[in-house]
Amino acid sequence: MKRLLTIAAAIGWASLVVAVLVTMAPSQALAERRVALVVGNSNYTAVPQLPNPSRDADAVAKMFKAAGFETIETYLDVGNLDFKRAIRKFEDIAMDADVAVLFYAGHGIEIGGTNYLIPVDARLASDRDAPDEAIPLDRLVLSADGAKKLRVIILDACRDNPYAGKMRRESRAALRAVSSGLGKVEPSSTDTLIAYAAKAGSTAEDGERNHSPFTAALLKHLTVPGLDLRLAFGRVKDEVMKTTNGRQEPFVYGSLGGGNYSLVAAPAETTGVSTPAAADVKADYDLVEKIGSRKAWEVFLSTHKTGFYAELAREQLKKLPEVASLGPAAVPPRPSRGPSTRELIDWEKVKDTGDITAIKSFIYRYPDSTLAVTAQAKLDVLEQAAREREAAGRAEREEAERRRKEAEATKRREDEERRAAAAEAAQKAKAAEAERRAEEARRKAEEAARNKAAAEAEKLRLESERVARQAEAERKKAEAAAAQETACKSESERFDVIAAKSGEDASVEDLKRFAKEVSCERLKPQVTAKLESWTINTPTLIKSAQTELARINCYGGAATGAMNDATRTGLSRYLAVKKRPTNNVKVTPELVSELNKQAALTCPTLCPRGETAQGTSCVAAKPASTKAAKRDEPRRETRRREAPRPQQHQRQQASSGGGAGRAATMIGVGF
């Protein structure tokens, strides 16, 4: 199965293996001892709390219990000391176990290539605090080394970490990076998997419901009875990608041996046993088809024994070359074959390179190639050279550090001598400065006394001038008030004489001249009010306006001099024709003069329906055609009988007003 997982990793399907929780066939499961450590940290004290990790941990612990695990150690919201004690206790529990599984949900962070899990009471002010305040991931991994068959570490700890932006970089190791999420790690022992909720260097979502997307997918798919875990992990990956719209992709590091594993053993074959959904079977088939190995097809058939896709899988299995039967403990040898064209092309790219990552990638992609042995030898040489360079660099750094410390000590001695000399010079300068300041203070005191006396004298002079100006202003104000009162009295007497004439034409003109000349402020409102009462809406003006409105076809009533509704309507019609406001109309001499200048028929004649205006008369409308007239005659007759009779046209003789001395005749519709 190692080869199957290696090939799967080469095509990107290692990301499907998120966690491995193993039970064998029913007879084997009874003999296995499976233990688990579950930790969920939500209530952090120094950073914002996470709502889901404690709920995730509790749900996973219940899942392990339902799967038949013998011992399940569960811890929620643990601090630094309790976290370390829990790990130490689990080391003893896992020592005699067959399968050891660890699940952690909470904050995790990478600092300078080292992964740390964060207790709830951690205080991470700088990167140098991490070894004391946090738990190295390696310590958690090593706690499961005592398990005989399988060790699995599941980490839902790749959330967007708030420590990353706050921590100071104080380490001398080239300002180590502080990153959210966890970095890539390769297990040192076989049959060990480290499963991340997201790829190395990326972050996982905490989720908006009761569980994170990663944990929710595990709880949903890993307990399907009889479903091989590799197929179940494919469903987990698909669901997380779908739930997060592709933002989060689970990933796993490490590999396992061969065998068929399921979290819950398949039930005995009885009548009425439910079959997997067709969509799930097809998804499993598509997954195995991409892997394409014999072992993968055998795993599929062990889970889905019958059906359309099972038959297709058997046909796919027949197409693969036969492999000799191996004993249970045998390891299939690597086939001795020449490298393919693709291998040769990729080898040409890396054979002369010093890039360790590129050579590792070649070995990872072509583990069965004869060139992999050469690549491994080259890799060993490069890694040894890298270690030697690191040792030389370390020695060089230590020597540089020693020289730096010696230089600092010399500099400290020189600084102390300079400080002593500077202190003595400063003492002398301080005494001289004190003497200079005393003399300066005496001089300033004398100058201040002189300035104060001059200021007092200037203040007295300015005050006397101010009093004199104020007295002069009061005198002028009194004179102006007396002159104003005299003017008001004279103008008031003149106004009374004009007002006594009761609006005669001559008195109106006198009042207008007086309004322009009046200077008494309290008399001006009275003059304005009197002038308006003599010049706006007077009977004479209204009568002249009625006469002119009748002449220009805007008014059909008599010139009575009274402001009635018909007069207001006529004025509104005229103003509407002139496109001016029609509200609050006032009859003034100016308006009458304006009306006097208008031509006849300024307002159009209004005729009833069926008639048209000709000048000031309304005549029956000429039909469009004889046929149309005959066709419409009955309807017009019916309307004529049913409609009320229009108001009788009126002829009114109106004489022109406004002093023009001319008369005009107007025929129109009455209002």
Image (cartoon, grey):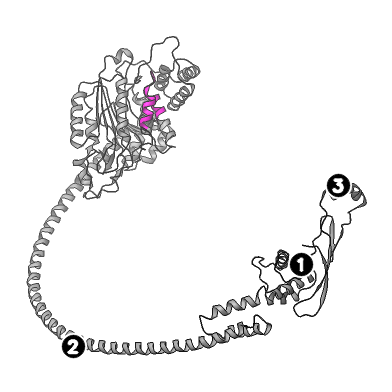
Give the crowd class for mark 2: few <14, some 14-19, many >=20 residues within 10 Å: few
Residue named by callout 1:
555
Callout 3: SS: helix
The C terminus - image quarter? bottom right
Residue 251 badge: none
Callout 2: SS: helix
Residue named by callout 2:
450
Between circles 1 and 3, the one closer to the viewer is 1
- Going from N to C along the chain, the mark reached first, 1 or 3, is 1
- Going from N to C along the chain, the mark reached first, 2 or 3, is 2
Image location of residue 256, percent across then percent down: 32, 25
For residue 504, side relative to residue 21 (left or right):
right
The N terminus - image quarter? top left
Give the crowd class for mark 1: few <14, some 14-19, many >=20 residues within 10 Å: many
What span is in magenta? Answer: 214-236
- Going from N to C along the chain, the mark reached first, 2 or 1, is 2
User: Looking at the picture, which amino acid does disc 1 mark?
Assistant: Tyr
Q: Nearer the viewer, residue 71 or 330?
A: 71
